[in-house]
Image: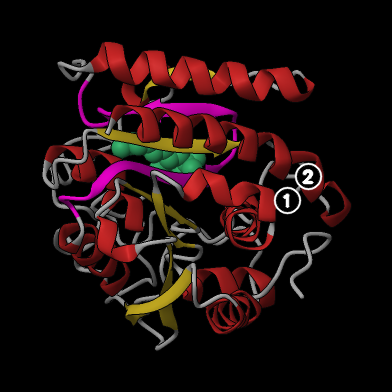
């Protein structure tokens, strides 16, 4: 059984996915989408009551940044709710969910064993280790808010998609791009619902829809216990940073609706709500996910 009273290691999360695929083959299927730099399996759980029905897909990933521990916990909780809670099965009538809980397992494990605030991948460079995988996607790569210094926490990488982890996310989204209608990538912290673009202050031409949906989700979350999210484009409400997965999903793969969700802060550094506070956060965000689910089910 998975626990949300602690932060699970990568192998515990993957073991949970394996167990769900074994115990619930009617809704949960595992797909290996590659390996991390250090050789850890990147596993995506496909949640569908009828894979042949070509339903719209909500694609979720988390943990692209190693230290943002609440994000993999949130993704795992979404899986738990969709697969193990009977009353939530109805959410799958019109929608499939694909969830990759830990994009960057090497970094995630490193934050458990060595350095709590590590952010990047663990690929070995000339002088320093790691690339910021969320500066490594190939859309306006390196144009703004990314570093060419290998040792920087926001290092963009030696080329677009230099990292096997960003390649794996790219290839998986590309493979299912005709069905993916919504891309959610979980980060922390700051309580933001960010939509493209992150590489320019210009607004996408369908910004009104992105903003209205984001506002609806933020309102849904706020109703739970008052947590307030800010909604807007990355550049306009946070900062400009090119090479993010959200911009690539929308700008290249054509996933119209894409959001980076910055979960709430906690603990000493913002990235580390103590274990007993994890469950203060996950259920309210899940309510927001249900609002997304409803929108996608109604629209497509
Ligand atoms: O800087 C980031 O990658 C994200 N914030 S974080 O504090 N989790 O590092 C925001 C990414 C927003 N999206 C783009 N800039 N494309
Ligand atoms: Zn992040």
What residue is drawn where x is 59% and y is 31%?
Answer: 190
Q: Is residue 168 left or right of residue 184?
A: left
- For mark 2, give the secondary structure: loop
33 is higher (above) or lower (below) than 68: below
Q: Is disc 1 in contact with disc 2, using a CB cutoff of under 8 Å?
A: yes
The magenta stretch is 177-200
**Disc 2 crowd, CA 10 A, few/some/many (<14, 14-19, 20+):** few
User: Mark 1, residues whose alpha carbon is within 10 Å: few (<14), some, or many (≥20)?
Assistant: many
Whether residue 81 is visible, yes or no, is yes
Q: Nearer the viewer, residue 71 or 137?
A: 71
* Quarter of the image where one finds residue 139: top left
123 relative position to 162: left or right: right
Residue bearing the label numbered 1: 272
Residue 142 in picture, x, y percent from top left: 18, 45
Residue 268, disc: 2
Query: Which of the two residues, 84 or 274, is positioned nearer the viewer here?
Result: 84
**Residue 244 seen in this snapshot:** no
Q: Position of residue 104 (x, y in %)?
A: 44, 67
Q: Is residue 182 magenta?
A: yes
């Amino acid at each position: 059984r998975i626990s949300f009273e602690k932060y699970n290691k990568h192998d515990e999360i993957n073991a949970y996915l394996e167990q769900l695929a074994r115990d619930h083959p009617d809704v949960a299927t595992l797909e290996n989408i590659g390996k991390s730099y250090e050789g850890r399996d990147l596993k995506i759980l496909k949640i569908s009551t009828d894979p042949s029905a070509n339903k719209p897909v909500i694609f979720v990933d988390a943990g692209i940044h190693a230290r943002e521990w609440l994000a993999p916990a949130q993704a795992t909780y979404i899986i738990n709710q969709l697969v193990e809670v009977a009353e939530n099965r109805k959410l799958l009538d019109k929608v499939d969910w694909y969830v990759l809980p830990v994009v960057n397992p090497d970094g995630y494990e490193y934050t458990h064993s060595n350095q709590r605030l590590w952010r990047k991948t663990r690929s070995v460079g000339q002088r320093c280790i790691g690339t910021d995988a969320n500066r490594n996607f190939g859309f306006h790569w390196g144009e703004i808010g990314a570093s060419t210094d290998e040792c920087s926490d926001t290092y963009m990488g030696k080329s677009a998609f230099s990292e096997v982890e960003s390649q794996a996310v790219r290839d998986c989204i590309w493979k299912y791009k005709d069905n993916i209608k919504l891309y959610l990538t979980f980060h922390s912290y700051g309580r933001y619902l960010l939509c493209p673009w992150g590489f320019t202050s210009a607004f996408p031409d369908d910004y009104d829809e992105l903003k209205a949906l984001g506002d609806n989700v933020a309102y849904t979350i706020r109703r739970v216990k008052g947590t307030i999210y800010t909604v807007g484009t990355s550049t306009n409400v946070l900062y400009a940073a090119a090479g993010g997965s959200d911009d690539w999903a929308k700008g290249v793969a054509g996933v119209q609706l894409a959001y980076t969700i910055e979960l709430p802060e906690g603990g000493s550094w913002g990235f580390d709500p103590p274990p007993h506070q994890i469950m203060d956060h996950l259920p309210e965000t899940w309510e927001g996910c249900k609002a997304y689910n409803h929108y996608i089910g109604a629209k497509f």
